[in-house]
Structure formats: C-alpha cells, structure tokens
Amino acid sequence: MTSLIEKEYHYNNDNRFASRKEIEDILTEQVQLDDEFLDNSEMKEKFPISNDAKNIRGLKGAIETFKEIDKRKYDVTVNLSNVRDLLLTKIDNKLEIKFNIVSNEGRMLIPNAHSLYSARKKFLDHFFAMNKFTLRAMDNEQLDIAQKTLAELQIKEQYFKNSGVFRFIDTTENNKDKTYLRAIIGNGYKTIYNNAAIFYMSIVAISRLEGNYVLDWMKVTDSTIAISYMQKDKVPVAPGLYLTTGIMVENSELGTDAGTFKVQFKISNKDGETTRFINYDEEIASINHGFTFAKIKANLNALLQFSSFQDDIIRAVKRIKWNDTVNSEQLNILTAEISHLRGNETADVRAKLLDEIDTYEQTKKAFSILELFSKFDKIVSNNSIKLVVEGKFYKWLKNL
C-alpha cells in the first residue's frame, strides 16, 4: 500500500537560511507513548547545532515540507487481552486485520483499527507466530479456520498476557476518521528516534562538517524519511566531468532498525547530465532505535572523518574512464545487477532498464558510462526505487 501522505522537497537555489528556532522546532513532532509525550529537550542539549547550520543550504524549504506531514501518530502499550473483535479480512486480495482496543475495564479506547504496511504480519507473528499459516489459509479459501484458531489461542493465558507497543496513526478518508496500526515493536523500544529526531540529528551532524552543503532532496512520508546532503563544491575528475560527494540519511518508524548515514556521490558533465551513486554496503554512522544518547554521539562522531571517505571516492572515481564506451561484458554484469531488483513496485522499472540495455546491444550504439546512466536516470521517476537502483549502479561501478 502506498503511504497515507507523502511529500518531496527539491532544492531550487533557495538561499534562505533556517533559524536555530526553526531547526529545533522540528522536534515539536514528539513521540506520544501511553498518553505521555516523550521530552525532546535533552536531545537539544546533548546535540547542539553548530554555527546555526549556516553551512547547509536548502534547510528552510526542507523543514517547511517536513511540517506538511501532519497526521497524528501515537504509540500505545497493549496487552493481547485488550485486543477485541480481532478479524482477519481479505481486501483487494491482501490479508489485513481489524480490531478494537479496550481498557482493562472494557471501555472502548480505539475502535475499528485496521492494519497498514506490514503491521498484519508483525501482529500475527509477534503474538502467535501465525502469519504464514493465515496467508496459506487465505490462499486455500480457509480463512475461517485461521480465524477460529486465533480466537482459541487469544483466550489462552500464555498468549493473552503478552504485550507490545502498537504504533497508530489517525487520518481522514472520504470525510471519515480512520485509525491504522502502522507497526508493533517490543516493549524495550520506547524510542524517541522518530523521523523528526533523525532529521534534527542529521542537521546537527552535517553542521559540524567542514565545507558547505546543500540539502538537495528529501522525501518524507507518514512513516519514513530520506534526506540527501551534497557538498556544494564540485571536484573535476576528468575533462568536462565533475564529482560532488555527500551523505544519504534514511529512517523508518515501522520497525526497530536504525537511522542510517551512507556515502553517496554524483557525477555530472558540462551539459548538466548527472548520475548519483549510493554505497549501500557501507554505513558511515547509524542511530539504532535502542541507542542511548552517549552511543549516538559516539556513532555520529564517525561523520567527522567524512573527509577521508571523500578522498577515497575521489581517488576511485578518477580511476574510472567515464568517457570510454561500455563494452558487452560490462553490460552483462550490469544486466545481472538490474535483474536482481525485486518487488512488484520495481518490476516495471526493471523491465524498462533491461529494454534499454537490449536496445543498446541491438543497435551497437556506443555509449559512455555517464551517457548510459543519464538515460537510465530518465527512466526511473519513482525516487524510492531510484535509491535502490542507484545502489545497484554503485556495486557495478566499483567492480569496473
């Protein structure tokens, strides 16, 4: 299912600077756990912004875009015994669950909640380890058997005493209020590292680096965020070719993984054709959702060594003959990388990229590396898929 709400920001040479207050106000999107808001004031104290982040262009517009995500999100610690009227339902050939949450006294707290994203899988496996069983039952037109099994297990003591943190989001669809369960996490992850926290800490981290940066692109949804920071200055790497390096930050509120900081770089020519490559195999830093502030600070300090990563990239990129024609063997390797793209959302992109390579093979038209990737860049319009594809490009590129 697509996101409930999704916004993108693209830098357009906006030279407005964000004020310190505007940056700190990102943290007003607080995590609400069991009717209490977790205090973010300590985060501002432990992670101060350097020089008011004046080395980052594009912040003000990105913050304005981020604030457009205005859905109410909240976490509730729920015992299975407080889940009532649990129903397995098939919607558009997909299995979902809906249920009510009641208090210990039986008072209705959250009516008619529906699962969203992978919450159904997490719910069924968290409490019963039954996701695969219910999917098999649905495929065999025997969902009533799975429903009966769930009802029988739910009243057994070894099950109904178990609990988890339910991550809810409220929205309005067709003038009707709806509540969705986004995810379930264990009780040990009462985290404050939501998208707002990761966005804020990424600004803090970049503000400490030498040189000037541009927040050139950001995609934020109700539950995920991806932020691209690129150095403002370009480095010539070959006649008519230029390199810019940067950091890609990603986070999801749908699980207990980590906010990640990865190396990226762009190659551009004098005609303005640009291709981005992302090294998904190597994190510079990460913010695990179970980390203490001290652990986060130690991890973010690794970003201070980004200049050494930049030097390595420059040396590696200069070795590549960007203007040379791509040969058949190199294309075969690239075909294999693209063929490994998985998922329904990438199927159309995979087919178009492979068609482009096939056209190249049939016509025997000579393309340089940059020309070929520039053509690919025009094919992939979905930025989430583009990030995955650019990771595949990097893996191919480093083996040239």
Image (cartoon, rainbow, N blue to C red):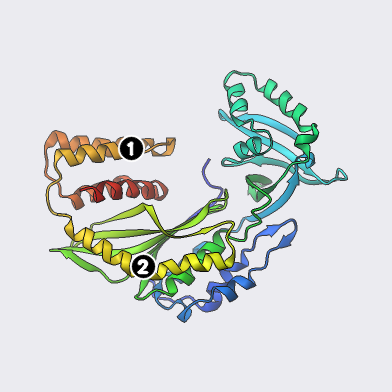
Q: Which residue is mark 2?
A: 306
Q: Helix or strand or loop: what does disc 2 sit on?
A: helix
Q: Report the side of 51 relative to 80 (left or right).
A: left
1 vs 2, front mark: 2
Task: Tell me the CA gap for discs 1 and 2.
Answer: 33 Å
Q: Is residue 67 visible?
A: no
Which three-letter amino acid code belongs to the residue tagged 2? Phe
Within 10 Å of the Cα at label 2, are there few (<14), some (14-19), or many (20+) other Cα atoms? some
Q: Report the side of 398 relative to 207 (left or right).
A: left
Q: In the image, what residue occupies the spot 27% across and 61% down?
A: 313
Between residues 67 and 255, which one lies in front from this camera angle?
Answer: 255
Q: Report the side of 330 relative to 118 (left or right).
A: left
Between residues 84 and 163, which one lies in front from this camera angle?
Answer: 163
Which three-letter amino acid code belongs to the residue tagged 1? Arg
Residue 306 vertical placement versus 396 (above, below):
below
Q: Is mark 1 in CB contact (under 8 Å) with mark 2?
A: no
Within 10 Å of the Cα at label 1, are there few (<14), some (14-19), or many (20+) other Cα atoms? many
Q: In the image, what residue occupies the spot 62% across and 37% down?
A: 120
- Residue 159 location, x and y as percent? 75, 35
Q: Is residue 46 visible?
A: yes
- Residue 105 location, x and y as percent? 88, 45
Between residues 314 and 362, which one lies in front from this camera angle?
Answer: 314
- Residue 267 location, x and y as percent? 24, 59
Q: Which residue is mark 1?
A: 350
